[in-house]
Image (tube, grey):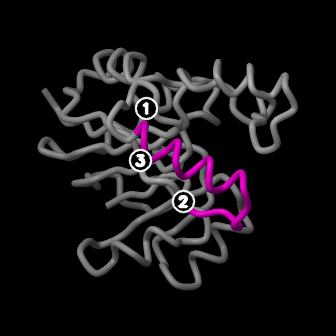
Amino acid sequence: MLDVGCGTGGFLAFISEFFAVYGFDASAAQAEYARKIFPEVRRAASATEYVALLGCPEIKFDVITLWDVLEHIRRPIEFMNDLVAYLDSSGLIYISTPNANTMVIKSTLARFYWPGFDWAPQEHVAYYSPSTLRFLFAKLGLRVLRIGSTAVYPRPFSAFEVFRRMGFAVTAWFPKWAPQIYAFAGRL
């Protein structure tokens, strides 16, 4: 399993009981931290660079995950095509990303100075919705298996946090409007 944007290795630690884990991150500091626990982690900006650093040109992955990574990528089709080249013939790709459809709502609420309803266009270079993820996977020659809404990750407790968690609970049934979405895809 390859975790793209593995950070300090949190997901690798969680899943390492079930898979041989690999990972790369663009941050040298985070990759070095994770590498102390997971020796296959490297600092890299693409799958090809990562595989070259590993010295395993024939490697294929059963699962490739991207947790809050795709929205930071300036050339997503090129980046994802590079990843798909290392996906096993029966492999799966999992992406979790903020939902573009909710950005309109957040922008509107931010105009009314609601705390917590801010977003950073300088940090996220692209946003995705269920329909744009379907488009991306089609361009990559992958079949979407499922698109859904991700669970809320807890933040420090506040009145806003109660409102935020309620919003996640309500939209969990409607991925089109969920704040955070995921998609599973595999080869056609």
Chain-order first, disc 1 or disc 3 = 1
For disc 1, the neighbor class at 10 Å (few under 14, some 14 to 19, many from 20) is some
Give x and y (percent) for residue 64: 34, 50
The span from disc 1 to disc 3 (Cα, nearest Å) is 21 Å
- 186 to 103, vertically: above or below: below
Give x and y (percent) for residue 61: 27, 54
Secondary structure type for disc 3: loop
Q: Three-letter amino acid code at disc 2? A: Tyr
The span from disc 3 to disc 2 (Cα, nearest Å) is 9 Å
* Disc 2: which residue: 153
- 101 to 97, vertically: above or below: above
Give x and y (percent) for residue 117: 75, 37
- Magenta residues, as a range? 154-171
Q: Three-letter amino acid code at disc 3? A: Thr
Q: Nearer the viewer, mark 1 or mark 3?
A: 3
For disc 2, the neighbor class at 10 Å (few under 14, some 14 to 19, many from 20) is few
Q: Would residue 91 be found to the left or right of residue 113 on screen? A: left
Asked whether the residues under the numbered discs 1 and 3 touch, taking CB atoms below 8 Å apart as contact, a structural biologist would say no
The span from disc 2 to disc 1 (Cα, nearest Å) is 26 Å
Which mark, residue 150? 3
**Residue at the location (77% across, 44% down)?**
116
Q: Quadrant of residue 98?
A: top right
Q: Quadrant of residue 36?
A: bottom right
